[in-house]
Amino acid sequence: MPLLFSYGTLQDPAVQRASFGRELDGRRDRLPGYAVADGTAAVRHTGDDTDLVDGTVFDVTDDELATADRHEPGARILTSLDSGVRAWAYLPA
């Protein structure tokens, strides 16, 4: 089952139900090397692993990942999280 890291609206159970028809199973994690851009919900790459973006990593199906591809901005990139797991995240190109 793929893992999907979200630092934004996909953490909201109402958004999950609207997007996937269910609430997702997830756990807190952090994305190293990125920081939240000032005054926005967007992130920017810093390359500094001490910069961390808080979020949630979710277990999703392949179909749910394809659904997220149609709705999420940015490029889907396989990345390593602070916990050491690898997960997909939608990040600026």
Image (spheres, grey):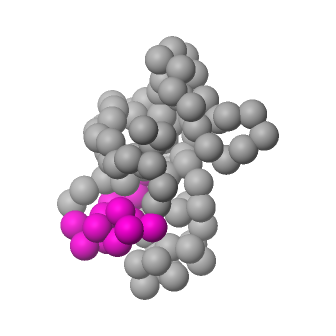
The part of the image, by quadrant, that contains residue 65 is bottom left
Q: Is residue 10 above or below residue 4?
A: below
Q: Is residue 71 above or below residue 34?
A: below
Residue extending furthest right?
Answer: 39
Q: On the rendered structure, is 21 left or right of 52?
A: left
Q: On the rendered structure, is 54 left or right of 75?
A: right
Q: Residue at x 53, y 63 (%)?
A: 10
- Where residue 54 appears, x then y in whole percent? 58, 40
The part of the image, by quadrant, that contains residue 63 is bottom left
- Where residue 31 appears, x then y in whole percent? 48, 34
Indicate yes or no whether the magenta region holds residue 8. no
- Where residue 33 appears, x then y in whole percent? 48, 23
| Closer-to-camera residue (82/36) | 36
Indicate yes or no whether the magenta region holds residue 69. yes
Q: Is residue 27 visible?
A: no
Q: On the rendered structure, is 55 left or right of 74?
A: right
**Chief SS of the magenta region:** helix
Q: Is residue 70 visible?
A: yes
| Closer-to-camera residue (23/77) | 77
- Where residue 90 appears, x then y in whole percent? 43, 48
Q: Residue at x 48, y 55 (%)?
A: 73
Q: Residue at x 51, y 27 (%)?
A: 45
Count of marks, rendered view: 0
Q: Which residues are magenta?
A: 57-71
Q: Is residue 67 above or below residue 47?
A: below
Q: Residue at x 43, y 30 (%)?
A: 82
Identify the image quadrant of the N terminus.
bottom left
Identify the image quadrant of the C terminus.
top left
